[in-house]
Amino acid sequence: MAKKYLIALDDGHGMETPGKRTTPLTKDLYINGKLIRKKGQVIKENEFNKAVVNYLEKALKRCGFDVLLVAAGDSDVSLKTRVSRANKANADAYISKHYNAVGGKWQSKAKGLVTIIHYNSSNTSKVLAKNVHEELWKLHAGHKCTNYGVRKDTDVSGFSLYVLRNTKMPAILTESGFMDNLTEAVDMLDPTFQKADAEGTCKGICKTFGVKYIPPENEKKEEKDDNKNNESNEINTDVKYIKVITKELNIRSAASWDDDVISGTVKKGEVFTVVKKIKVDSYYMYKLKSGYFISASSKYVEELKKQK
């Protein structure tokens, strides 16, 4: 039997990490005719990072990989914890998804894609970066932007990046655009672009590990059926947030208690935003804003009517 590879996914920063957001938008943002963000509001970097990681997790599992989420949830997770989780699990690769920025105001000069590796990275990291970058560039080639290529962390930032320096497996960090460039900032909240970025990343990972890439031909139908089933089991709730009160708790990519949908674990004290409550096989789950599912049992989580 062929080896089943474990890929650690890092969605880069938390929803409330200071500075990791655009400056206020200069006009209303519409995507496919729908108002997504009003003038004067901002886009948080993690809104893109987390959405892409959610799509990438599904793509990788579809292709036969195991996946570890090292920073699940809305709150920030320290770099040390992220790296420790990947190293402890002996992951085969570490993928960190980000969106770039030059400064604190809108600019038009910097625009494009860069993939970053440690200045003293392994050959496999270089191959992984090359394969992923080539696939991602296909999404940008017609956007009149710059292909910054695969770069060493010290060349880009002037210092080595923690998640690339301390991981024990091949590791890369992708910057899929510039959030201080208004044209590319719009893409951050576009599901079509998010999914394409995830699929491109998946293709590059598959090529690196010699795994056949399987396209998402039937995903739309499956998602529609899952949503229909979930809606029929939805329970009214005024819970806005939950706090983990047990030492460690599984999060899941689908509303199921099956082990194969476990996406990772969260720790005691972490707080998550609730979207809805769902009954699954006589027990209850919360669907989180991040798209993941978690047990609603009072043994494991504390219900919060407002964020602490």
Image (tube, helix red, strand yellow):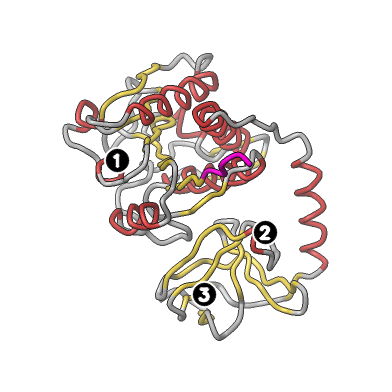
Region of the chain picked out in magenta, as a range: 1-5
Residue 267's quadrant in the figure?
A: bottom left
Q: Nearer the viewer, residue 160 or 106?
A: 160
Which of the image's four quarters has the C terminus?
bottom left
Mark 1 — residue?
164
Disc 2 secondary structure class: loop
Instruction: Give the residue drawn at x 45%, y 24%.
Output: 133
CB under 8 Å between discs 3 and 1: no
- Amino acid, disc 1: Leu
Q: Nearer the viewer, residue 76 or 255?
A: 255
Question: Residue 41, can we see it?
Answer: no
Mark 3–mark 1 Cα distance, whole angstroms, equals 32 Å
Residue visible at 53% across and 42% down?
52
The residue tagged 3 is 242
Q: Camera-side residue: 99 or 132? A: 132
User: For the residue marked with disc 2, what is the amino acid?
Assistant: Ala
Circle 1 residues within 10 Å: few <14, some 14–19, many ≥20: many
* In contact (CB < 8 Å): disc 3 and disc 2: no
Q: Nearer the viewer, mark 2 or mark 1?
A: 1
Compute the Cα span from label 3 to label 2: 18 Å
Assign a secondary structure to mark 1: helix
Residue that carries the numbered disc 2 in the rendered image: 254
For the residue marked with disc 3, what is the amino acid?
Ile
Residue found at the very far left of the displayed protein: 158
One can see residue 229 in this view: yes
Q: CA distance from mark 2 to mark 1?
A: 30 Å
Q: Residue at x 61, y 64 (%)?
A: 293
Q: Is residue 8 magenta?
A: no
Residue 56, label in figure: none
Q: Residue 152, percent across and down?
A: 26, 27
Crowding at mark 2 (Cα within 10 Å: few <14, some 14-19, many 20+): some
